[in-house]
Image: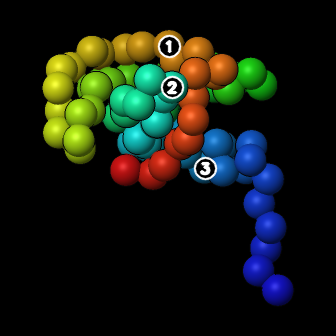
Amino acid sequence: MPEQKRPFDVLNASLNNTVIIGMKGNYEMRGKMISYDVHMNIVLEKAEQLVNGEVKRGIGMVLLRGDSVVYISPS
């Protein structure tokens, strides 16, 4: 039987790695996840906004509000 992971286990495994985060409003952010909290507020470093998988603009460091996050995926 495969080991079951809890959501915070997955978030912990994503720390200091590049992730793609889907946001409400149908856009994506990519960057190195350096922090998160229990509300799923996420801090990304070297963040970029993606449109159709292509970089639209570089943002740098950004705090993403947890209630706007739809999904988090390894990059």
What kind of residue is marked 1?
A: Leu
The residue labelled by disc 3 is 13
Q: Is residue 37 above or below residue 52?
A: above
Residue type indicated by callout 3:
Ala
Q: Is residue 35 visible?
A: no
Q: How many marks?
A: 3
Task: Please report whichever mark, 1 or 2, sits nearer to the chain's N-terminal start.
Answer: 2
Percent coordinates x, y for residue 40 in the rendering: 68, 26
Mark 2 = which residue?
24
Mark 2 or 3, which is nearer the eye? Answer: 2
Indicate the position of residue 28 as horizontal and vertical percent values: 37, 33
Q: Is residue 9 visible?
A: yes
* Residue at left offset 55%, top offset 41%: 71
Residue displayed at 48% across by 28% down: 23
Q: Of the two numbered discs 3 and 1 on the same chain, state the one appearing first in sequence.
A: 3
Give the x, y percent position of residue 11.
64, 42
Q: Nearer the viewer, residue 47 or 53?
A: 53
Structural crowding at the residue carrying mark 2, measured as other residues with C-alpha within 10 Å and reported as few (<14), some (14–19) or many (≥20): few
Dot 1, how many residues are within 10 Å of its Cα: few (below 14), some (14-19), or many (20+)? Answer: few
Q: Residue at x 41, y 41 (%)?
A: 20
Residue at 66% in and 20% down: 67
Alpha carbons under labels 2 and 3: distance apart = 23 Å
| Kind of element beneath mark 3 | helix
In the displayed orientation, state which residue is furthest to the front: 25
Which image quarter: residue 5? bottom right
N-term-proximal mark, 2 vs 3: 3
Q: Could you classify mark 3 by the number of other residues whose Cα lies within 10 Å: few (under 14), some (14-19), or many (20 or more)?
A: few
Badges 2 and 3: C-beta atoms under 8 Å apart?
Answer: no
- Identify the residue position indicated by label 1 in the image: 63
| Type of colouring | rainbow
Q: Amino acid at mark 2?
A: Lys
Cα–Cα gap, marks 1 and 2: 15 Å
